[in-house]
Image (cartoon, rainbow, N blue to C red):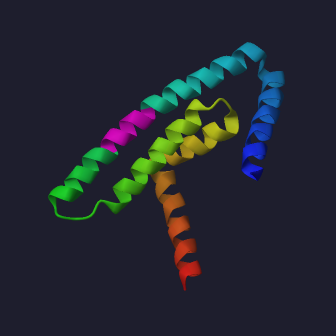
């Protein structure tokens, strides 16, 4: 419930602050630009992940990382479509493979610590 209220408040605050610095039209164009570029790159990364998953399956291995990456990329594409700068930053962090691996490793480390 807190995130449902907090995320729009943060987005509106950032839109007002950034819009006052660079202008309303530039802010709107930047939002559209990040959405278009982000969704295109999400499609590209999604196809690469799908290809890697099929490669894992052909080796008779479970494509666990690829399944998690696919879900993360889909969530990132959704965040990039939502107008706002905070969601765009999180979306781009989830789309890029290097930052996605770092995020996954942190989550796995925290999960194994809690499991013990």
Majority secondary structure in the magenta region: helix
Residue 73 position in % (x across, y down): 46, 44
Q: Is 45 situated left or right of 95 in this image?
A: left
Q: Quadrant of the C terminus?
A: bottom right
Q: Is 84 situated left or right of 19 in this image?
A: left
Q: Measured along the vertical axis of the image, is residue 19 above or below residue 71? A: above
Q: Residue furthest bottom?
A: 116
Residue in the image at 20% along x and 57% along y: 57
Res 24 → quadrant: top right
Residue 17 position in % (x across, y down): 83, 30
Q: Residue furthest front?
A: 1
Q: Measured along the vertical axis of the image, is residue 14 above or below residue 90? A: above
Res 50 → quadrant: top left
Residue 9 position in % (x across, y down): 80, 39
Residue in the image at 25% along x and 45% along y: 51
* Camera-nearest residue between 94 and 99: 94
Residue in the image at 79% along x and 23% along y: 19
Tell me where the magenta segment starts and ends, as one range. Answer: 41-48
Residue in the image at 54% along x and 81% along y: 115
Q: How many marks?
A: 0
- The stretch drawn in magenta includes residue 83: no
Residue 2 position in % (x across, y down): 77, 51
Q: Measured along the vertical axis of the image, is residue 72 above or below residue 31? A: below
């Amino acid at each position: 419930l807190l995130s449902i209220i907090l995320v729009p408040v943060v987005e509106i605050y950032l839109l007002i602050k950034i819009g006052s610095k660079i202008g309303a039209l530039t802010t709107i164009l930047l939002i559209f630009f990040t959405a278009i570029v982000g969704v295109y790159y999400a499609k590209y990364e999604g196809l690469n992940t799908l290809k890697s998953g099929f490669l894992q399956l052909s080796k008779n291995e479970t494509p666990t990382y690829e399944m998690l990456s696919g879900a993360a990329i889909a969530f990132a594409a959704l965040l990039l479509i939502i107008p706002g700068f905070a969601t765009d930053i999180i979306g781009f962090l989830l789309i890029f493979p290097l930052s996605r691996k770092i995020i996954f490793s942190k989550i796995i480390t925290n999960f194994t610590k809690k499991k013990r």
